[in-house]
Image (cartoon, rainbow, N blue to C red):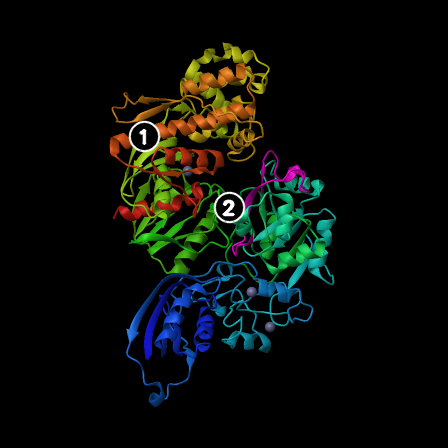
Amino acid sequence: MEVRRRIEVSGIVQGVGFRPYIYRLATSRQLKGTIRNTAAGVTIEIQGPAKTVQDFIERLPAEAPPLARITSVTVQALPCADLESSGADAGFRIVHSREGEEVRTLISPDVAICADCLREMFDPNDRRHFYPFINCTNCGPRFTIIRDIPYDRPSTSMAKFPMCPACLAEYDNPLDRRFHAQPNACWDCGPQVKFWGTAGQTIGCDDPIVEAAQALRAGSVVAVKGLGGFHLAVDATNPAAVALLRQRKRRVEKPFAVMVPDLQAAEAICELDDAARAALQSIQRPIVLLPKKPGHIVPDEVAPFNRYLGVFLPYTPLHYLLLAAGKFQALVMTSGNLSEEPIAIDNREAVTRLRSLADSFLVHNRDILLRCDDSVVRVTGGVTRQLRRSRGFVPVPVFLKEEIPSVLAVGGELKNTICLTKGKHAFLSQHVGDLENVESYNFFHEAIEHLQRILEIRPEIVAYDLHPDYFSTRWALEQTGAKLVGVQHHHAHIASCMAENHLEGRVIGFALDGTGYGTDGKIWGGEGLIAGYEGFERAAHFEYVPLPGGAAAIREPWRMAVSYLAHHFGRDFLELEFMKLDIPFARELNRSKVEFLLQMMEKGVNSPLTSSCGRLFDAVAALAGIRQLVNYEAQAAIELEMAMTTKGAEEDGAYPIKLLPDTASGNDRWIISTRPLFEALLDDLGHAAPVATISRRFHNGLVECFVEVASLLRKKTALCRVCLSGGTFHNVYLSQRLEARLTEAGFDVFTQKEVPAGDGGLSLGQALVGAASR
Ligand SMILES: [Zn+2]
Ligand SMILES: [Zn+2]
Ligand SMILES: [Zn+2]
């Protein structure tokens, strides 16, 4: 018996080889019908024997092309068409959409070169042998070359390269892997590579890639144009080259990531498990933070004082050719910028901005229209978590549980991302960076405009952080024509965690981070909330201490140690026994600076109050002798965590932390007092306890304290779901142990995976809170 079915498929199904896939699936079964692109995705009409049609429908999602992401398939029965008498018996056809009807659907992110293209590129008999821009429907650039929609060659930076007859034939053939591959190109018709000096002059040579590889071998810094921007590259196994890059980039100790040629090379440097291998080889090719192996070939200078190393595999054909040309085992590949500026993308811009950093430039003439940094993930307990969600993931949306109004959420100040919502989709932008810097702020504007344009979203609501001095907040407050909604920073963190876990109603939320503006004008960061999208109640927080010198206290952890000591023990802390010990904190403390700080705090000058968890880590790290000054954000906290997991630290004690009812404010709220913690810590210092022990007891103390807070809040509210968010949860030990202990105590624990727990995920939470305000 013949049947006819209409199948609507939505998700990422355009520009990913979906129509040729369906064409092959249908023709191989002698099914008849059509496929066309529609606003929602694709519509297939299929006719044939009932059993074959059923088989077709079942296989359709299972064997879809690698870049497709199907979000729904609906099937509807139609009356059979009399194909023979209508003369429509033309087998299966791809029907081209009418003008204006094309592509209103999800756009694919940039994807690493596929195995087929890689094989062709290294095949001396292939017409694209060694061609650095080889790609097909299953791989290559997308998001970073799109100027506008629909996603067609004229709307991309490939517009200026007319296809040669051979490329065009592939492009037009539904059975070819390059059918409608918009960036399709070859040696004859596509982009080319050049090797430039620091003045932007072309350096004549046979092969620019070989030339660049030789420069790297000789220890120089080469700026390499990639997919979402320039990298600065040096040979990672050459300590002098790494030191040179650090010095030029003014990056003292912040770890660099390394690109390695293949999985074996990664395995030689780091400990891998199956989940890590999968993350490294995924089509997104993020930087994966992995535990270093002892005695590996990458010198310590690449990631000093850190047991982890950021490793990634090549993702463009150019990367593969460069690594092969120099036979490199590891290249440092760091964003082409000076400290926290956005990554450079344009050739001339790169030469201007990077000439003091690089000795030469490996450039090409396929323009990058939108910058997009490398993504960074961590794999813990078999779960991949985003630390920086950018290239390869953007603009794939976070899928929401319910449809929500269109919101533009502008994120925070550091690690900024923005978020636009449409229906059940939340589109987070790529990593924008720290808005304090002018280039990043310009990029913030670009990101908003570009996302609005390619997604065709006009937001009804603009959501922003409550901090009056954030550039994103100031920008939001100037917008007209949309409802403006201010969202408290930690409320946004918890809402972000709820959104990606499809939670509704209210939850217990622990939002732990460095800095977020509170509704009382103080700096929050160690918060226990009862929260839903509609609002929150501050149910517990760390007791306030002064932040002496504001931003200076963030750069100088010793200041936080002094703040906590003075807060708990008065200025007499200087007379305490531990100050007479031969420990780094006591030895290095400058008494006149301390006196200055004490006076500043006593007079309340430039000493805002904070309940920050990050600053508590800083104070403990300083006292434990780990670090009195930091060179990058969260360095002291990271090194405190690293100190703990050194072998031999099997200490399972926990520093005591006390919960006090907040009688002063008249609120039903717990104040988390750290006094017993510091008493125990000073006692440990007096007994010359190892740093590893101090660190573990501190971490365990925090965990037990939050389990207790959660239990008290469950008693009060009957809520059992706990959400964990905020930058502090990038701490693996704290996250894993707290999750385990809460689970033991009968809670359902939810964490962030798809978006970062840090401020890179803030905009998602703002969007949901903004939507709920309507
Ligand atoms: Zn390919
Ligand atoms: Zn060609
Ligand atoms: Zn935060």
Residue in view at x 56 percent, y 51 percent: 344
Amino acid residing under circle 1: Ser
Is residue 193 depicted above or below 527 in this figure?
below
Q: Name the residue nearer the viewer: 548 or 90.
A: 90
* Left-right relation of 140 to 503: right
What residue is pinned by disc 1?
711
Q: Name the residue nearer the viewer: 98 or 367.
A: 98
- Residue 306 is a magenta residue: yes
Residue in view at x 58 percent, y 35 percent: 306
Q: Can you give x and y, in whole percent of width and height, for residue 151 in the image?
A: 45, 66
Q: Name the residue nearer the viewer: 663 or 361.
A: 663
**Residue 298: which quarter of the image?**
top right
Q: Which mark is residue 391?
A: none
- Magenta-drawn stretch, dominant element (helix, strand or loop): loop
Q: Can you give x and y, in whole percent of width and height, for residue 684 in the image?
A: 51, 17
Secondary structure under tag 1 reads: helix
Q: Can you give x and y, in whole percent of width and height, for residue 159 in the image?
A: 52, 69
Task: Specify the segment rendered in magenta.
Answer: 281-309
Instruction: Give the spatial CA distance, label 1 vs label 2.
Output: 32 Å
Secondary structure under tag 2 reads: strand
Q: Can you give x and y, in whole percent of width and height, for residue 449 in the image?
A: 42, 55
First in sequence, mark 1 or 2: give its number.
2
Q: Which mark is residue 377?
A: 2
Q: Nearer the viewer, mark 1 or mark 2?
A: 1
Q: Name the residue nearer the viewer: 212 or 84.
A: 84
